[in-house]
Amino acid sequence: MADVRLTTASFLVLGTVDKLGEASAYDVKVEAAATVAPFWSIPHAQVYAQCDRLVEAGLLHEVRREGGRNRRLLRLTDRGREVLGEWLADPDFVPVEAREHAILRLWFGARPQELAPAQLSGHRRILAEYEGLAESVGELLTPGQREALEFGIRYERMMLEFWEWARSRREQLPGT
């Protein structure tokens, strides 16, 4: 087993394979896009690279399906399950890196009055999607999934509040 530095993307792959029981890299990519993408995106190429790294590290076991497309299916090894469990139990605080493009634009001098309409519209749309999801399938989600969805709802509400504040603040400041 190779010694490999695990990243959040590594744990996204391990957690997804664990959830699915057995998965190809493509299955991981599709599942991530359908579930965690709103709060943690991962480029498709990185999914494939992570799968290779995790197989090499002995955290995933690969099985080739005979016939058809000869797909490579992945399962957690005992060590992979152990490492994932340790990560899930780790309470360490890691600061959030929001990576909000419009906030970076503000930093470099963009005007909130020009940015706010599009930001408010986009955050309202995403909030409506999350609230609709909570209403339609909220009871079917695991507690952790429901809590992650609630984070998304609260984040979008906070962003709406922020953009309303930034727009109105600048409108009240002299010379802006």
Image (cartoon, helix red, strand yellow):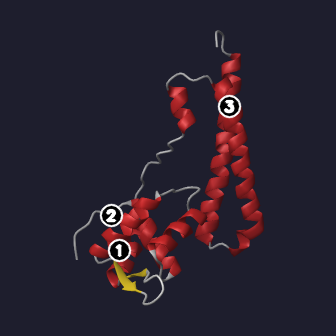
In this rendering, the answer to whether 50 lies above or below 116 is below
Which callout, 3 or 1, points at the residue further toward the start of the chain?
A: 1
Q: Quadrant of residue 87?
A: bottom left
Q: Position of residue 90 (x, y in %)?
A: 40, 66
**Residue neighbourhood size for the residue with mark 1, other residues' Cα within 10 Å, grouped as few (<14), some (14–19), many (≥20):** some
Q: Which quadrant of the figure contains the N terminus? A: bottom left
Amino acid found under the numbered disc labelled 3: Ala
Residue appearing at x 70%, y 19% in the figure: 171
Which callout, 3 or 2, points at the residue further toward the start of the chain?
A: 2
Is residue 88 visible in the rendered structure shown here?
no
Q: Position of residue 170 (x, y in %)?
A: 66, 20
Q: Position of residue 93 (x, y in %)?
A: 42, 54
Residue at the disc numbered 1: 83
Say if mark 1 contacts mark 2, CB within 8 Å: yes
**Residue neighbourhood size for the residue with mark 3, other residues' Cα within 10 Å, grouped as few (<14), some (14–19), many (≥20):** many
Q: Which quadrant of the figure contains the C terminus? A: top right
In this rendering, the answer to whether 2 lies above or below 94 is below
Is residue 29 visible in the rendered structure shown here?
yes
Indicate the secondary structure of the residue bearing disc 1.
helix
Indicate the secondary structure of the residue bearing disc 3.
helix
In this rendering, the answer to whether 33 lies above or below 60 is above
Say if mark 3 contacts mark 1, CB within 8 Å: no
Residue at the disc numbered 3: 116
Q: Position of residue 82 (x, y in %)?
A: 36, 78
Residue appearing at x 66%, y 15% in the figure: 173
Amino acid found under the numbered disc labelled 2: Leu
Residue appearing at x 35%, y 84% in the figure: 78
In this rendering, the answer to whether 39 lies above or below 17 is above
**Is residue 34 rendered to the left or right of residue 72?**
right
